[in-house]
Image (cartoon, helix red, strand yellow):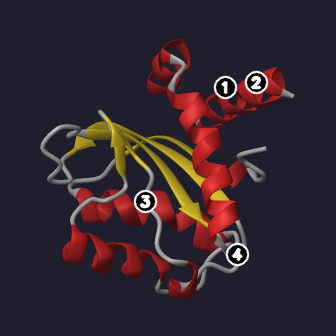
Amino acid sequence: MLILHSRLAQARKRATDWRQALEVALGPLHSTGYTRAGYCQGVIDNTLEWGPYYIVAPGVALPHARPEQGAKANGIAVTTLEEPVYFGHEDCDPVWLLFALCATDASAHLATIQRISALLADEDLLAQLREARTDTHLLSLLNACEHQEE
C-alpha cells in the first residue's frame, strides 16, 4: 500500500515556488515520524546541487533524498497543488503532483518508484487526482487503485 496514514494525502495545497512546494509535500513525512528534521533541507540542497532530479513526468515530481539524509522509515506522501509551480525542468514544468518519498534502503526506494510508475501510466487516475478537492477524496482515489491491483 502506498499511503499508510490519512495525514499523508494533501489535496489542493498552495505553494509560491519549488522550495515551498517541497516543504509542503515533505512536511507530512516528518510530522508522522518517517523522516528526521533536515530531510526536506536535504532535498533542497540536492536540488540546488543537481537540479530537479526527481521530476519524472510532465507535472509530476517524486522528491526524495538519500537514506542517510534523514529517512527513518519507508514512507510516501502525496500532494496536489492548487496552482502548479516551476522547478526549472525544461520538459516537465510546471509541477502539480508530488509523491514525496523516504526510503531506508535502495530496494525499498525502487519498489516504491515502480508502484508510482504504474499509477502514472493511468491517465484517468491522474485526471481524478488533479480534480480531487479534499485530502479524503485524494486518499480514497489512491486506496481504490491500490485495492484494484491486489
Disc 3 designates what residue?
63
Disc 1 designates what residue?
141
Toward which corner of the image does residue 71 lie, by quadrant?
bottom right
Q: Secondary structure at mark 3?
A: loop
In x, y percent, where is residue 129?
Answer: 52, 26
Give the camera-side residue of 26 and 88.
88
First along the sequence among labels 3 and 2: 3
In the image, residue 140 sits, relative to residue 105, either above or below, namely: above
Q: Secondary structure at mark 2?
A: helix
First along the sequence among labels 1 and 3: 3
Q: Amino acid at mark 2?
A: Ala
Disc 4 designates what residue?
33
The quadrant of the image that shows the C terminus is top right
Q: Secondary structure at mark 1?
A: helix
Give the camera-side residue of 82 and 143.
143
Q: Amino acid at mark 3?
A: Pro
First along the sequence among labels 4 and 1: 4
Q: Secondary structure at mark 4?
A: loop
Q: Within 10 Å of the Cα at label 2, are there few (<14), some (14-19), or many (20+) other Cα atoms?
A: few
Residue drawn 58% across the image and 79% down it: 67
Residue drawn 46% across the image and 86% down it: 38
Pointers 3 and 4 in contact (CB under 8 A)? no
Judged left or right of residue 101, residue 88 is left
Q: CA distance from mark 3 to mark 4?
A: 17 Å
Q: CA distance from mark 1 to mark 3?
A: 21 Å
Judged left or right of residue 103, residue 58 is left
Toward which corner of the image does residue 10 lie, by quadrant?
top right
First along the sequence among labels 3 and 4: 4
Disc 2 designates what residue?
144
Toward which corner of the image does residue 51 lie, by quadrant?
bottom left
> Taking the image as drawn, is residue 16 in sight?
yes
